[in-house]
Image: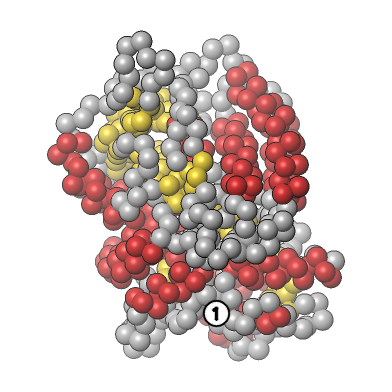
Amino acid sequence: MQFETDFLIIGSGIAGLSFALKAATLGRVTMVTKKNKVDSSTNRAQGGIACVLDKNDTFADHIRDTLISGAGICDEEVVRMVVENGPECVRELLRIGVHFEQDNNGQLDLGREGGHSTRRIAHAYDLTGHEIECTLLTAASGHPNINILENHIAIDLLLASKSDTAGSEASHRDSCHGAYVLDSQTGEIHSYAAKVTILCSGGTGKVYLYTTNPDIATGDGIAMAYRAGARIANLEFVQFHPTCLYHPKAKNFLISEAVRGEGGRLIDENGRLFMQKYDPRGDLATRDMVARAIDTEMKTSGNDSVFLDITHQPADFIKKRFPHIYKTCLSYGIDMTREPIPVVPAAHYMCGGILTDMAGRSSIESLYALGETACTGLHGGNRLASNSLLEAVVYAEQAFQQCKKDWPELARKNPPSSPSWSSGRAERIEECILITHNWDQIRRLMWDYVGIVRSTQRLHLVQETLAPIQQQIRQHYRDYLLTPDLVELRNIALLADLIVRSALARHESRGLHYIIDYPNQVAEPLQKFTTLQKPPTPAHH
């Protein structure tokens, strides 16, 4: 069955919801989300949104901090656009009803995080993402023009060619008109035709064994776009958050960078400070430097973690500023007001993604990418803390303005009908071990060989090991009826391969990409974007 909509949005984080609320003024919006509406990386964002909101702060300072963090390959024009448009987008969030913390004078209580030269992080204590997500969801859920499909997962994009010619050997499929979508509860696959398709499905953290990301972060948007022939860029720049709680029963729990912003210090098992050895900025160095320092400390000592100590701050201050972190740590028997928190780095944020222009448009017509799914040029080789939510709201506005400008022409477009999904002779998968074994293999391989420190030898070894696993997955994809797990497995296998290929293509160490064969950053970047692209193939089964 084919459904029709004006705007098809894949994902329900801050980028998708921000765009949906705006696009709903133009036409019908359908949002596809894999789990429940609230399941997104936005919902887990603890720190806040970086923005010039204080009279003592300047655009020039925020731009400079972003460029320094980005290791010389940010797109300066993009950085300036995002920073300068930030304040109005934050004011818009306030108008919608987002509650950021205020000081006693009624001004925003701004925090500071690693890499920032001043306090500029608007936050809702340590639950900023949850506050934004819930506020936007409430607004979207009650909108008559927005339909949110929970427990649905997009499989592949619907493509059409404007350059098909009779008798040509190959057609150039360069226009997107929707996606095939699996209803996880019924197992049915429908096509959703749309005038504009927006990919904002989050990042790729679940490609790695240890991650701060929610279970949904399997790189679906990037994988679908790559299969469709879109240009993908900079996947070698995987940001590992330096401080994830290390506890056998804790899963994916992040200790916000704001803890270091409020005076938290990294120490070894003997209580010794160590960050000054690696960077003059100490505990407030950028994430690439801190994660690499912790990785070195752990490898040198053989210990399973380092520690984050904020016990020198008053207990009441810690409980008020970090209520969620305090309660969560306490539930694992760690009182952060009295003892250091054991922490390790974990895969956190993908700085690369679908290459877009300044309106969020991909290289495929009518296909946009927003948020962590996109590579805009803002983050360069290493994202500055709390610039992610900023990028999401600014690019949602940029994409909306482009769609609004194009709407007279878009409104006249009727998406072509798509062939129904054919499952052929595929059978129901009875043994889930077929999926879970491959899933575990890929994630452990990526963690062991494509982590914070890489080598050419290990990258080639991963490629060789991944090849037969990918062949097995392709066979599963042909033999079995699709399930959400199989769709996600197919995507993380592709993302693993793309990350390795990107890492092999950059013959220097820069930002988050540290490779021992090329330990130095060359004077002039080898390239701003490591791009990958494949010829598009038919999307249907």
281 and 86: which is toward the camera:
281
Position in image of residue 162 (x %, y %): 29, 25
Q: In the image as oriented, which residue stretches furthest toward the front? A: 523
161 and 333: which is toward the camera:
161
Q: Is residue 27 left or right of residue 150?
A: left
State the residue position of label 1: 261
> Is residue 166 in view from this perspective?
yes
* Rendered residue at 38%/26% (across/down): 173
Q: Secondary structure at mark 1?
A: helix
Position in image of residue 225 (x %, y %): 45, 37
* Rendered residue at 59%/33% (across/down): 490
Q: Is residue 236 left or right of residue 83?
A: right
Tag 1: amino acid: Gly
Query: In the figure, 431 relative to 318: above or below?
Result: above
Q: Quadrant of residue 229?
A: top left
Q: In the image as oriented, which residue stretches furthest toward the right? A: 302
Position in image of residue 461 (x %, y %): 76, 42
Query: In the figure, 460 relative to 392: above or below?
Result: above
**What count of labels does the image hold?**
1
